[in-house]
Image: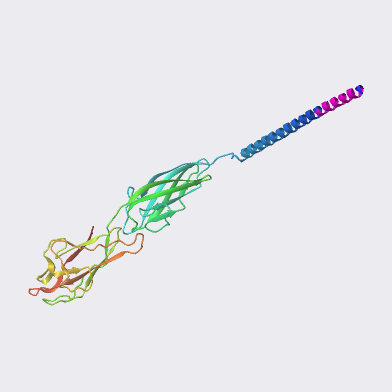
């Protein structure tokens, strides 16, 4: 029985050692799997980083195109200085400058715009103009000349010239300014004022004798008038010299509205007289002129002697 107990104890010890060995083996196996998994994850992350860097390297451009500079040297008309419009024709204005690019300037366009507009304003005669075909000379160091034609009714004030130059990389722009001067201009449509026969002490009544004119400038004006018997001799107390006698200047009348009787029209004096009415220019850029009209009448003195044909001079001037 003792031998039996001793054998039983040995067997239990062996089995216990095997169980311990099994636990240690399992621990080793677990550690190996953990290490393998960690190494596998690290490997994946490393590969992902390498792939990402490779893509970035492939996408980098091998060369660059860059517009280095755009400069405007002059914005003016043919006369230089501020832009002087003319009542008889349109005015050509120019924007000169230069642009440089490592790959070459491929084109340029210009926008000219007045004080009531900006570079986004749609082109409209008198306020905004565009030139999409500027003249370009050269490539990497190019000069440009952009022109447009301004109507004589173009808006006065500060104007801007915006140049946009292009190359393979995109656009670059520059802006400069100049001003369009205001100017008054009048054009007479009526060149002769013919009154009908009038008896001594008579008047022309409500019949109007017209003097018509155009505002051919870009600013409003009033009319200043004078009458005298001899050309170039103002401050004459008489408006008309007749075959016999004279007609005093106060007998020559005017109105700014039609249909008034000659007796209530305003008398001229021996000094220039100015209307209260402002005659504005046409809409900026319009091809039509603003028309103005003065309505004249005449009264004849009741006593003379006054006889025969009468004549004199009527001066019409535009003033602010």
Q: Is residue 2 left or right of residue 192?
A: right
Residue 2 image point, x, y percent:
91, 22
- Queried whether the magenta region covers residue 6, the answer comes back as yes
* Residue sitting at x 64%, y 40%: 55
* Residue sitting at x 43%, y 48%: 163
Between residues 52 and 108, which one lies in front from this camera angle?
A: 52
According to the image, what is the colour scheme of the structure? Answer: rainbow
* Residue sitting at x 82%, y 27%: 16
Residue 64 image point, x, y percent:
55, 40
Between residues 8 and 25, which one lies in front from this camera angle?
A: 8
* Residue 205, image quadrant: bottom left
How many numbered tags mark residues here? 0
Q: Is residue 212 left or right of residue 98?
A: left
Locate the C terminus and report the quarter of the image it occupies. bottom left
Give the residues in magenta.
Answer: 3-19
Residue 88 image point, x, y percent:
32, 59
Vertical placement of 164 versus 276: above or below?
above
- Queried whether the magenta region covers residue 31, the answer comes back as no
Q: Main secondary structure of the magenta part?
A: helix
Vertical placement of 204 versus 188: above or below?
below
Q: Is residue 41 left or right of residue 294?
A: right
Q: Is residue 166 left or right of residue 87?
A: right
């Amino acid at each position: 029985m003792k031998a039996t107990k001793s054998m039983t104890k040995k067997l239990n010890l062996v089995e216990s050692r095997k169980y311990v060995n099994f636990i240690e083996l399992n621990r080793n196996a677990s550690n190996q799997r953990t290490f393998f998994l960690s190494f596998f994850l690290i490997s994946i992350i490393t590969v992902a980083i390498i792939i990402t860097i490779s893509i970035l390297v492939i996408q980098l451009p091998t060369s660059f195109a860059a517009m280095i500079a755009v400069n405007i040297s002059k914005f003016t008309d043919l006369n230089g200085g501020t832009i002087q419009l003319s009542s008889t024709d349109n005015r050509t204005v120019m924007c000169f400058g230069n642009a440089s690019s490592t790959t070459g300037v491929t084109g340029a366009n210009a926008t000219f715009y007045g004080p009531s507009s900006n570079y986004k304003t749609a082109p409209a005669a008198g306020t905004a103009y565009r030139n999409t075909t500027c003249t370009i000379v050269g490539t990497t160091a190019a000069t440009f000349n952009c022109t447009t034609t301004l109507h004589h009714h173009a808006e006065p004030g500060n104007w801007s010239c915006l140049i946009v130059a292009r190359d393979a990389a995109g656009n670059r722009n520059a802006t400069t300014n100049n001003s369009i001067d205001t100017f008054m201009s009048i054009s007479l449509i009526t060149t002769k004022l013919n009154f009908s026969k009038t008896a001594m002490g008579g008047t022309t009544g409500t019949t109007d004798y017209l003097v018509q004119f155009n505002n051919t400038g870009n600013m409003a004006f009033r009319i200043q008038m004078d009458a005298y018997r001899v050309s170039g001799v103002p401050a004459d107390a008489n408006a008309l010299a007749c075959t016999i006698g004279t007609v005093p200047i106060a007998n020559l009348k005017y109105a700014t509205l039609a249909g008034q009787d000659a007796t209530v029209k305003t008398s001229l004096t021996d000094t220039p007289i100015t209307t209260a009415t402002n005659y504005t220019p046409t809409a900026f850029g319009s091809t039509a002129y603003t028309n103005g009209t003065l309505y004249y009448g005449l009264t004849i003195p009741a006593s003379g002697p006054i006889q025969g044909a009468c004549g004199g001079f009527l001066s019409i001037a535009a003033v602010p």
